[in-house]
Image (cartoon, grey):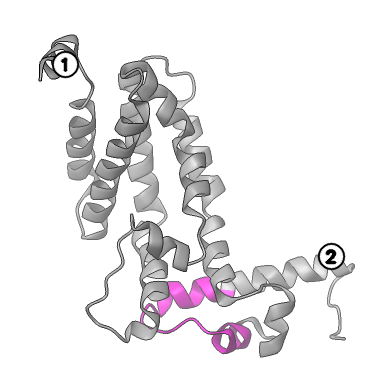
């Protein structure tokens, strides 16, 4: 049994798990063209390769944990930015703004790289380019897309249900699609000050009016 460099076994395990996630993140951030392997992670973390599997079941677990370590901060920022806002339009504006801001603050693009590497290990197929809103790509990266979306979209769905009763889920999906466009624009080098108003306007323009509803009903 390896020597425990902590006061308790629990603390030792937590330290090793943190070291493994740190090592995986360092590789994913700084060596995007490198295939994430147990050997590379173990070397960075300073443990034996086979010891990794005492803490995770696969390398995909570490991809997931790298992404998930940023979720509480992101969700906390969203909740803080939207708390107490009663007007649905103002809420949508704040929600879109803070999500785009968090994408910049967390360097959202490198998280996309995690997905790309899972889809195309070692970049062996140069034409493969996973998208940040591709459910299958995230699943292969070990990320539970349904869980992430449920946490991110619960209040969004409620707001849209107020604006478009009976059609909230459709408008929620459309809003997420527009936000995805904003994320990709930022990843491509777009400035937040330019991207944000375009995305906000496009989403607010979807809010149905009475005249729009009656026209649609006549079709």
* Callout 2: SS: helix
Q: Is the residue 40 above or below the residue 102 in the image? A: below
Q: 158 and 136: which one is in front? A: 136
Q: Quadrant of residue 116?
A: bottom left
The secondary element bearing badge 1 is classed as helix
Quarter the N terminus occupies: bottom right
Q: Nearer the viewer, residue 211 or 101?
A: 211
Q: Up-down: is 24 above or below 151?
A: below
Please tell me the numbered disc located at residue 10: 2
Q: What residue range appears in magenta?
A: 23-44
The answer to which image quadrant residue 48 occupies is bottom right
Residue at the image point whose x is 48% and y is 78% from the top: 27
Which residue is identified by label 1?
217
Relative to 197, residue 69 above or below: below
Residue 188 lies in quadrant? bottom left
Q: Residue furthest front?
A: 219
* In this picture, residue 57 sits left or right of residue 137: right
């Amino acid at each position: 049994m390896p020597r425990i460099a902590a006061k308790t076994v629990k603390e030792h395990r937590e330290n090793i798990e943190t070291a493994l996630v740190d090592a995986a993140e360092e590789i994913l951030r700084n060596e995007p063209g490198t295939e994430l392997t147990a050997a590379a992670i173990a070397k960075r973390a300073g443990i034996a390769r086979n010891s990794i599997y005492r803490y995770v079941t696969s390398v995909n677990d570490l991809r997931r944990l790298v992404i998930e370590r940023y979720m509480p901060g992101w969700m906390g920022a969203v909740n803080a930015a939207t708390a107490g806002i009663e007007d649905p339009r103002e809420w949508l504006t704040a929600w879109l703004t803070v999500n785009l801001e968090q994408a910049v603050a967390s360097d959202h693009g490198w998280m996309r790289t995690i997905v790309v590497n899972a889809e195309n290990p070692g970049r062996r197929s140069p034409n493969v380019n996973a998208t940040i809103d591709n459910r299958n790509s995230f699943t292969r990266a070990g990320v539970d897309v349904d869980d992430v979306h449920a946490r991110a979209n619960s209040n969004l769905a409620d707001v849209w249900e107020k604006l478009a009763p009976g059609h909230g889920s459709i408008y929620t999906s459309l809003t997420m699609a527009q936000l995805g466009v904003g994320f990709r624009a930022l990843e491509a080098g777009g400035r937040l000050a330019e991207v944000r108003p375009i995305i906000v306007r496009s989403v607010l323009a979807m809010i149905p009016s009475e005249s729009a509803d009656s026209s649609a009903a006549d079709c």
